[in-house]
Image (cartoon, rainbow, N blue to C red):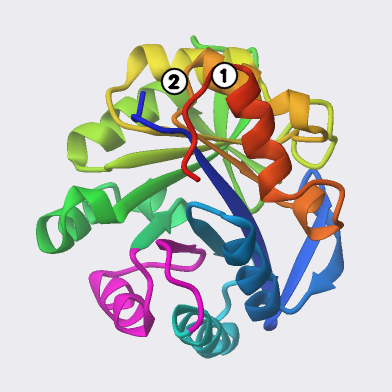
Amino acid sequence: MSLSVRVIPCLDVADGRVVKGVNFMNLRDAGDPVELARRYYEQGADELTFLDVTATVDNRATMYDVVSATAEQVFIPLTVGGGIRSVEDVSRLQASGADKIGINSAAIRRPPLIAEIADRFGAQVVVLSLDVKRSSRTDSGFVVTTHGGRTETDLDALAWACRAVELGAGELLVNSIDADGTKQGFDTELIALMRRETTVPVIASGGAGQASHFPPAITAGADAVLAASVFHHGELTIGDVKRELADAGMLVRA
């Protein structure tokens, strides 16, 4: 586990606006991404993650603008994912201010892309984003999905994570589609399996509803915790989460 626990707000962006739904469906407007990013930075967020949830060619230029405007005001690591298909996409996003790149569907379609990005920019830049569902079809009981959880692949989530790390992924963003937006807590079984089978940092995502949900994710093996709606709607602040983690005996950054 990392020396200190990272708390990471996630901003799902569509057409230049932050959106949020339940189980990746019924997306609703949640605000301006640059304003929200600045708020979370001032609250003490350790990193920020932007996910372009529509990721069409038309939206890509909008996302570059959002990243650039955020990088001018927010001085913590920015991870950007959604619609990244090539090394050139990574290069342009980095030029706009992104520090790390989240990849999902493109890596599933062509796994060597992970190695290509890692070889050029370093493994620390590559965050493999896994949208995972429970399934009886795989050995681990978890399957990788695409298209916001709507399409199941044939990939066992644990096996795919291990292969991606071998190819050069430096971090795993593990999102439980079953828990996403439900506010019932993180899937600690999934987190524990990822921690047991892989060697890189694990970011737990999906299901946070109250401050007490965060320490169990770290106990299960996560190095960082990521959440969206509880922050966007003002139910919790970054400080609330860090205090809960600190009270549970976990080291957090001031």
In depth, the one of 164 and 244 nearer the eye is 244
x and y percentages locating residue 10 in the rendered image:
62, 55
Q: Is residue 60 left or right of residue 111?
A: right
Q: Tell me the amino acid under the disc marked 1.
A: Leu
Q: CA distance from mark 1 to mark 2?
A: 6 Å
In depth, the one of 211 and 32 nearer the eye is 211
User: Is 2 inside the magenta-drawn segment?
Assistant: no
> Which label number is shown at residue 100?
none
In depth, the one of 184 and 42 nearer the eye is 42
- Residue 176 in view here: no
Q: Is residue 128 left or right of residue 165?
A: right
Q: Is residue 235 left or right of residue 95?
A: right
The residue tagged 2 is 194
Q: Secondary structure at mark 2?
A: helix
User: Relative to residue 169, is residue 179 depicted above or below?
Assistant: above
User: Is 75 inside the magenta-drawn segment?
Assistant: yes
User: Relative to residue 196, is residue 225 depicted above or below?
Assistant: below
Give the crowd class for mark 2: few <14, some 14-19, many >=20 residues within 10 Å: many
| Stretch in magenta | 73-99
- Residue 84 in view here: yes
On-image quarter of the N terminus? top left
User: Relative to residue 219, is residue 42 depicted above or below?
Assistant: below
x and y percentages locating residue 183 in the rendered image:
84, 34
Q: Tell me the amino acid under the disc marked 2.
A: Met
The residue tagged 1 is 190
Callout 1 touching callout 2 (CB < 8 Å): yes
Q: Look at 52% across and 80% down and name the residue there.
A: 70
Q: Secondary structure at mark 1?
A: helix
Q: Is residue 113 left or right of residue 38?
A: left
Q: Look at 41% across and 33% down and name the residue there.
A: 4
